[in-house]
Amino acid sequence: MPTFQAPKGTFDVLPPASARYERLVSRFAGLVGRAGYGLLVSPMFEDVEVFRRVGESTDVVRKEMFDFEDKGGRHVALRPEGTASVVRAYVEHRPQAPFKAWYVAPHFRHERPQAGRYRQHHQVGVEALGSADADLDVEVIALPAQLFRELGLQRIRLRLTSLGDDTCRPAYREELLAYLRERQDQLCDEHQGRIEDNPLRVLDCKREACRTATKDSPRMLDRLCDECAAHFDRVKAGLDALGVTYDIDPTLVRGLDYYTRTTFEFEAQALDSSQNGAGGGGRYDRLAEAMGGPPTPGIGFGLGIERILLACDAEGVFGVPETTLDVFVIDTTGGETARDLTAALRAAGLRADRAWDNRSWKAQMKAAMHSTAALAVVVEPERITIRTLREKGEAETVDGENVVDQVRKRLA
RNA sequence: GUGGCUAUAGCUCAGUUGGUUAGAGCGCCUGGUUGUGGUCCAGGAGGUCGGGGGUUCGAGUCCCCUUAGCCACCCCA
């Protein structure tokens, strides 16, 4: 047993398994890059107040932040979610709107770890600021749907709702609060004393008590103001037009308080654990103001890389790629030729590796088999041969002067 | 944060009511065989049994603590 191990709730991803991370991120980068989103790099810790703006009543802020005082006495926190940092950066730099950015970043939450739930996990996501256009909601929601399709995932369910805005939500909130107060003693223990914080959360409670008590509660979707209703209708129509299927779920409440209007969540149904949320997001038209900036509408999402990969495992798609090398060099003459030839092959743009330590022919050949290379170049005192590694074939003796060209020819 | 289960070789796991040098398969290393590599044969390396304490003549096995993982709650990505 090693003396040290990765801290609780964290993990290492080693090659070759890590190749899936690489490929997933590059797929995502390609997808959102084609849609006009540029990479945004931001610090993985911020003034703790930046994250507090996402909502004081949320678990993320109340009990899951990795926060500490730095040597200058500043109270900072490791990023628990992605949107706050991006909106902070937007407000700080005031880029041209609409501003469309994507990110890939570690996220930290101090929770009890479980499969699919970690203290450090990784998300890819996008944020689009400066437009309230419902068609932007459609674009943003369609991106993860397209990603999942490209990965080959079948069993992803999109849940969708609207939380209203400042025009209609306050009245609804009061109505719901009144409804809940009448039934306060019927709610579960957790929510009996917490309905004032965020009454919407009670609707999402999984406990039987809350479920029955709120069965006939008023629904935000029935109380949307005209503008919000029109916005939501356009979002639905847009998704329909793009062939993105969804389920309207009026009980959907996301973990963050900043959402307005459109919110959504992608559920990986292949995962039977309760950690089956693959990603989610929504509109946050008041967050820029809360961050001290000008009123700026915005919408975005975050996707959990580990959750997506777990879902891929469960559906048997997007496995670790087989071949990562073109050619493997074996040298039984001392190693100088391997050193020079490998360098030449790489300079020619081929993926090449070699055996080390001047081992036996058999040991080097074994290493070549493990390498996943398609071809081996075998350097022996009297000749140089090219051999196939993945299927049977005759060794082909090659001229020492043109090894690179001949390898290239064989690969073509 | 609450509760339950688990921890033995690089990996997957055996290990009796506590008993003497802790095992297997796979993987790894060496040699032989093979069509100079995938087969087969022989040999070898590798474990303070997660860590600490206790009970006992004796602990991988029983007890306590601790660390980590898993599961449920909770929450979410």
Image: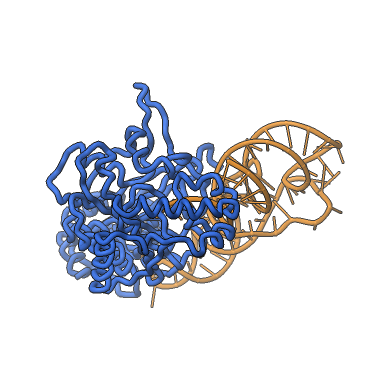
Chain colours: A blue, B orange
Q: Quadrant of the C terminus of chain A?
A: bottom left
* On screen, residue B7 above or below A148: above
| Residue sitting nearer the eye, A257 or A269 | A257
Residue A273 picture location, percent across and down: 52, 61
Residue positioned 24% across, 58% down in the render: A351
Residue positioned 39% across, 57% down in the render: A17
Q: How many marks?
A: 0
The answer to whether B66 appears left or right of A90 in the picture is right
| Residue sitting nearer the eye, A8 or A217 | A217
User: Which residue is most to the left?
Assistant: A96
Residue positioned 46% across, 41% down in the render: A64
Q: Quadrant of residue A242?
A: bottom left
Q: Quadrant of the N terminus of chain A?
A: top right
Residue A233 picture location, percent across and down: 27, 67
| Residue sitting nearer the eye, A234 or A24 | A234
The answer to whether B6 appears left or right of B16 in the picture is left
Residue A246 picture location, percent across and down: 35, 69
* On screen, residue A269 above or below A339: below
The answer to whether A142 appears left or right of A79 in the picture is left
Q: Quadrant of residue A406?
A: bottom left
* On screen, residue A58 above or below A344: above
Residue A31 picture location, percent across and down: 23, 61
Residue positioned 15% across, 62% down in the render: A402
Q: Is residue A53 visible?
A: yes
Q: Quadrant of residue A407?
A: bottom left
Q: Is residue A384 visible?
A: no
